[in-house]
Amino acid sequence: MQPVAEPDPWSAWRQFTNARIALGRTGHALPTAPWLAFNLAHAQARDAVHHPLDVPAIRQGLAGQGHQVVEVHSAAEDRAVYLRRPDLGRTLSEPSRQHLAALVTQPAPELLFVIADGLSATAADRQAVPLLAHMMPRLQGWAIGPVLIATQARVALGDDIGAMLGARFVVMLIGERPGLSSPDSLGIYVTHSPRVGRRDAERNCISNVRPEGLRLDAAASKLHYLLTQARRLGLTGVGLKDESERPALGGPKADDSPG
């Protein structure tokens, strides 16, 4: 008996990608299995957007690594407002602003890490704390402030936080917009001299941090390289290129000492 679903001649290529290729067909439609898989992926992406950040679990994980933890919230009061008003996700709520004002210290921290929900709290829940565990041994000699957990946050919220605490660098670990094969992808944004009004061209980004994408150890190596070079050059953004994979060709090494 002939199979109901007609296989695609490219089906052997599917082992090399998560992209939806060579799914076959049944008449003029998709076979049932890939159609159901598509709907599952779509549901997972929607869930990632609306799922709340597991703040207690993240706080517990950070405390286990010995970090001081501070919680802040953007001016977007809830998820519905956050999705409709991106601008409110870029600025601190007034209670969070007052809370941070009471924490200002001298000397100011050189480096701050902010764990934020962004558009996929699932990504922050799964990747952020393990990434910091990979990262901290690489940061000997850095004056690191408390780790902040930010809810209803956009990338630029780190500028507001960093400016208030006087940090030289802010690293945002934030959930990226989920795709149909990547609901748990973490983005890392590095900003030198954070202040309100910084543009995206003034940051460096490492994206797709997850087990099926850029693995945690590789992401930590790239982040260390960018921070080391940003510290040496006094900038981030388009003027700082990621050449962390060029040592064999004579480029700068990720563990070069800052000048």
Image (cartoon, rainbow, N blue to C red):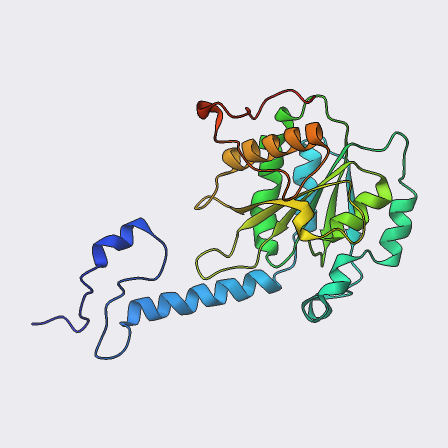
Closer to the camera, 70 or 214? 214
Q: Position of residue 12 (x, y in %)?
A: 21, 54
Q: Residue at position x 70%, y 56% from top?
A: 154
Tell me if residue 199 comes above or below residue 255 in the rendering: below
Instruction: Give left or right: position of 131 versus 102.
Output: left
Tell me if residue 141 comes above or below residue 38 in the rendering: above
Name the image quarter holding the N terminus: bottom left
Tell me if residue 252 comes above or below residue 18 in the rendering: above
Q: State the residue lying farthest toward the bottom.
A: 28
Tell me if residue 168 comes above or below residue 151 in the rendering: above
Instruction: Give left or right: position of 136 versus 76.
Output: left
Q: Residue at position x 30%, y 49% from top?
A: 16
Q: Residue at position x 67%, y 45% from top?
A: 203
Say which quarter of the image contains residue 162: top right
Q: Position of residue 255 (x, y in %)?
A: 59, 22
Closer to the camera, 244 or 116? 244
Instruction: Give left or right: position of 40 versus 88.
Output: left
Name the image quarter holding the C terminus: top right
Q: Position of residue 193 (x, y in %)?
A: 78, 40
Q: Position of residue 159 (x, y in %)?
A: 77, 48
Q: Residue at position x 92%, y 43% from top?
A: 102
